[in-house]
């Protein structure tokens, strides 16, 4: 089963940018629906962005629309989350998760409910602070 690894987090000032990477060793993510999720201390996990297999569909949380973009590098088999104009409220641990193509749904995008429950990575910390 696919096991994801996130990278690219860090400390950035408000208004700054980061690009997060979601990858799986030896596996291309092209055939999976992929979602990015985040969890801040004391808060529930929330869906940030998701992309269907084949790039047909993307979805974003209202709080990040216009600032975050999810996209694939089909040559590398990876998925990215490009984040611009970061705000202190974006501070959280960011995770990616996968599901089978037919699993792409509002439920997956909003909650991370997936048939590939072991796909979750360990997360990457994003801190937005001056």
Image (tube, rainbow, N blue to C red):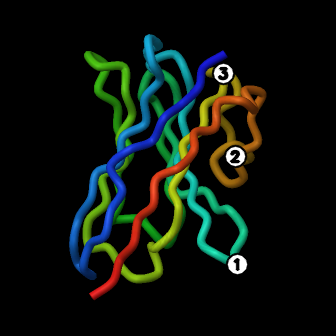
Task: Kindly identify the residue that appears in the image at 23 percent across and 78 percent down.
Answer: 15
The residue indicated by pointer 1 is 42
Q: Nearer the N terminus, badge 3 or badge 2?
A: 3
Q: Quadrant of residue 65?
A: bottom left
**Residue 105 spot, x, y in % from top left:** 68, 39
The residue indicated by pointer 3 is 100
Query: Closer to the observer: label 3 or label 1?
Result: 1
Task: Kindly identify the residue that appears in the image at 26 percent across and 16 percent down.
Answer: 75
On the picture, is 42 further left or further right than 124? right
Q: Are marks 3 and 1 in contact (CB under 8 Å)?
A: no
Q: Are marks 3 and 2 in contact (CB under 8 Å)?
A: no
The residue indicated by pointer 2 is 112
Crowding at label 1, few (<14), some or many (≥20) Cα neighbours within 10 Å?
A: few
On the picture, is 63 further left or further right than 18? right
Q: CA distance from mark 2 to mark 1?
A: 18 Å
On the picture, is 33 further left or further right than 112? left
Is label 3 in a helix, a strand or a loop?
Answer: loop
The quadrant of the rendering that contains the C terminus is bottom left
Query: Closer to the observer: label 2 or label 1?
Result: 1
Crowding at label 2, few (<14), some or many (≥20) Cα neighbours within 10 Å?
A: many
Task: Kindly identify the residue that appears in the image at 47 percent across and 42 percent down.
Answer: 58
């Amino acid at each position: 089963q696919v096991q994801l690894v996130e990278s690219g987090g860090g400390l950035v000032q408000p208004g700054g940018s980061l690009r997060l990477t979601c990858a799986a060793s030896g596996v291309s993510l092209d055939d999976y629906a992929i979602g990015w999720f985040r969890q801040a201390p004391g808060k529930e996990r929330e869906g940030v962005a998701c992309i269907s297999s084949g790039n047909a569909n993307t979805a974003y949380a209202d709080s990040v629309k216009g600032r975050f973009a999810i996209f694939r590098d089909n040559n590398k088999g990876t998925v990215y989350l490009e984040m611009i104009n970061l705000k202190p409220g974006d501070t959280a641990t960011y995770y990616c998760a996968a599901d089978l193509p037919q699993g792409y749904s509002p439920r997956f995008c909003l909650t991370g409910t997936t048939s590939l429950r072991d796909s979750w990575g360990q997360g990457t910390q994003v801190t937005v602070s001056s």
